[in-house]
Amino acid sequence: MAAPDGRVVSRPQRLGQGSGQGPKGSGACLHPLDSLEQKETQEQTSGQLVMLRKAQEFFQTCDAEGKGFIARKDMQRLHKELPLSLEELEDVFDALDADGNGYLTPQEFTTGFSHFFFSQNNPSQEDAGEQVAQRHEEKVYLSRGDEDLGDMGEDEEAQFRMLMDRLGAQKVLEEKIAAYDEEIQHLYEEMEQQIKSEKEQFLLKDTERFQARSQELEQKLLCKEQELEQLTQKQKRLEGQCTALHHDKHETKAENTKLKLTNQELARELERTSWELQDAQQQLESLQQEACKLHQEKEMEVYRVTESLQREKAGLLKQLDFLRERNKHLRDERDICFQKNKAAKANTAASRASWKKRSGSVIGKYVDSRGILRSSQSEEEEEVFGIPRRSSLGLSGYPLTEEEPGTGEPGPGGPYPRPLRRIISVEEDPLPQLLDGGFEQPLSKCSEEEEVSDQGVQGQIPEAPPLKLTPTSPRGQPVGKEALCKEESSPSAPDRLFKIVFVGNSAVGKTSFLRRFCEDRFSPGMAATVGIDYRVKTLNVDNSQVALQLWDTAGQERYRCITQQFFRKADGVIVMYDLTDKQSFLSVRRWLSSVEEAVGDRVPVLLLGNKLDNEKEREVPRGLGEQLATENNLIFYECSAYSGHNTKESLLHLARFLKEQEDTVREDTIQVGHPAKKKSCCG
Ligand SMILES: Nc1nc2c(ncn2[C@@H]2O[C@H](COP(=O)(O)OP(=O)(O)OP(=O)(O)O)[C@@H](O)[C@H]2O)c(=O)[nH]1
Ligand SMILES: [Ca+2]
Ligand SMILES: [Mg+2]
């Protein structure tokens, strides 16, 4: 058991309890030495036993609660029973408290007593006695058990008192010890105080720490709760998202299925469309071939019609010649009967009629002033036989009937030849003079001024010179007649047929060039072309017959709108300039752009620099022509209608190019859907 100051104090043992020794009579074996000692001490024990017993009685008196030890306050209790002061009791206590721990164990109590007695009786044996007493004490402690100690008698009291006195006598000795003890006690109390305060502080700190700890824990708890709260919310959110995702997943799945179905449908649709496309392509291909055939047939048809018209025309003209011969004879006879005055009258009428009867170009009979194809052939008869008919402008540019243009009524004072533009160029046809005996200046010589002068003189017809029997100009075919070269008179249909439009400023030599090309002759002083003229020439290109429909246009500005219309139908275009006239070269670009505007760049163009024979008057160097041709991807030649230089070569080059281009297109058409590659013209 730990005493208050921490020292270990063995618990005083009650009588009968011992260090493992049992109560009296337990017969526990004793040490051999012990027997010896017993003999020695037996004589002395009787008196002392009593004393010890008394001591025990005292002990128990003091240790009323039976704690097993005596504290100071127990000793104080004796103050009432004994005539001792508190100080004396304190001194006695201190004397007895051998180990100074503030408690008296039974050993210390009885030892004190026995010591006292021993010291009283035989001081010499004190030491031995002490040991023996100690040992004995232990035995006595052990051996006495439950022996009741009786009350203390007088003599005992006297002895006790004596003891106390002795003890008291040692007071002086003991005072010092007491003071010392007091000091120790005091220190002890201080220490206790300190311990107490330490304890309190400790407790305080402990409490503070505890409080802090508990606050901290509370804080932590709060944090944890918040975290828990957050986690719960997060979990809720995640659950929400999870549900949403799950829901979306279902929707996506559904959408997916729909998309798959749509996909399948689209695939089927696509397959069906591709089949339809293939069918359409095949149909397109066959339609293209049909169109191609139709186009060729149409061309052939046109050509045949033209041919037959030409033949008919020739036949009619022969008839006309015959009739004229007849007429002439008849006239001769009649003339003999009638006199000149009639002739003069007839002359007047004839001069008028002769204007109407001027033959025009072939195409003019079928194309009216606006360049639109006319309807019936009756015009031909009327024209040839001068039968007046109701129509607008005549071929020669005069109205065929006496109607006022635009009103439909004959004008006052009879019909006058109105100053209208000649629509179709005509070549002077000597026959009309023969017909009505009237004389006319050949058209090619008459200029617009002369026409005006004609209009100016109302009714006065200039004296016609005596009728010549030979025509004034060589009787060539009227312009527009088909000029079949001798060697190609075979009427077999050509393999190819190309339409070529011939443009260029006025007087550059287009008509002269075509005359050279078709009739291989040059006639100076050509009349300016009016509107548009037309020739056909068949060439032999690489052993195939290529027919060229040559449209000779009027270079004058005022016919520009008519010529424009013909560009669209063209397979090829020839642009001519006069190398002795710079202005005509400068206008080439404008011609090129109006061709480009009408047909784009799909049509090959031949550029011709004419009048090469007039080298001394050259104004346009060859290089300029070549440069322009290269820049615009044109075929280029310098030529002369006068000498015939390069007239055939240039058109042969163009015809060959057209033929090759058509072959390419045909090949491409056979391979469906491949567009024709445009070759460069100048090869
Ligand atoms: N020296 C020479 N003169 C030519 C040549 N070609 C044409 N001429 C003359 O130039 C003039 C005009 O000739 P045309 O053939 O009528 O000219 P054009 O281009 O038809 O004129 P428009 O019909 O008004 O467009 C005529 O007097 C011809 O004789 C040529 O190669 N050399
Ligand atoms: Ca003690
Ligand atoms: Mg001309």
Image (spheres, rainbow, N blue to C red):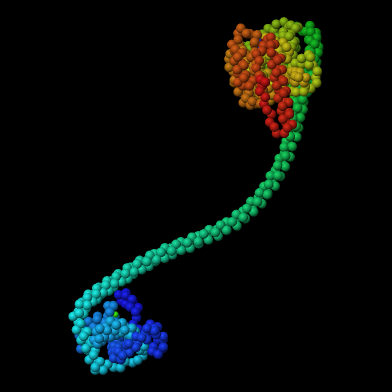
- In terms of image quarters, where does ligand 1 lie? top right
Residue 458 visible within the image: no
Q: Which residue appears at 20% of the width and 86% of the height? A: 165
Residue 261 visible within the image: yes
Along the horizontal axis of the image, is 198 left or right of 232?
A: left
Question: Which residue is at the front of the view, 498 or 332?
Answer: 498
Residue 580 point in image, percent of width and height: 61, 11
Q: Is residue 145 above or below residue 489?
A: below
Quarter holding the C terminus is top right
What is the total number of numbered labels drawn onto the structure image? 0
Question: Which residue is at the front of the view, 521 or 52?
Answer: 52
Question: Which residue is at the front of the view, 412 or 628?
Answer: 628
Residue 337 point in image, percent of width and height: 79, 7
Q: Which residue appears at 66% of the width and 20% of the height? A: 682
In the displayed image of the protein, which residue is found farthest to the top? 466
Residue 157 point in image, percent of width and height: 24, 91
Residue 209 point in image, percent of width and height: 34, 67
Quarter holding the N terminus is bottom left
Question: Which residue is at the front of the view, 206 or 120?
Answer: 120
Choose top left, top right, bottom left or bottom right for residue 101: bottom left
Q: Which residue appears at 60% of the width and 12% of the height? A: 621
Choose top left, top right, bottom left or bottom right for residue 103: bottom left
Q: Is residue 169 above or below residue 310?
A: below
Q: Is residue 369 above or below residue 455?
A: below
Along the horizontal axis of the image, is 158 left or right of 614?
A: left
Q: Which residue appears at 72% of the width and 9% of the height? A: 473
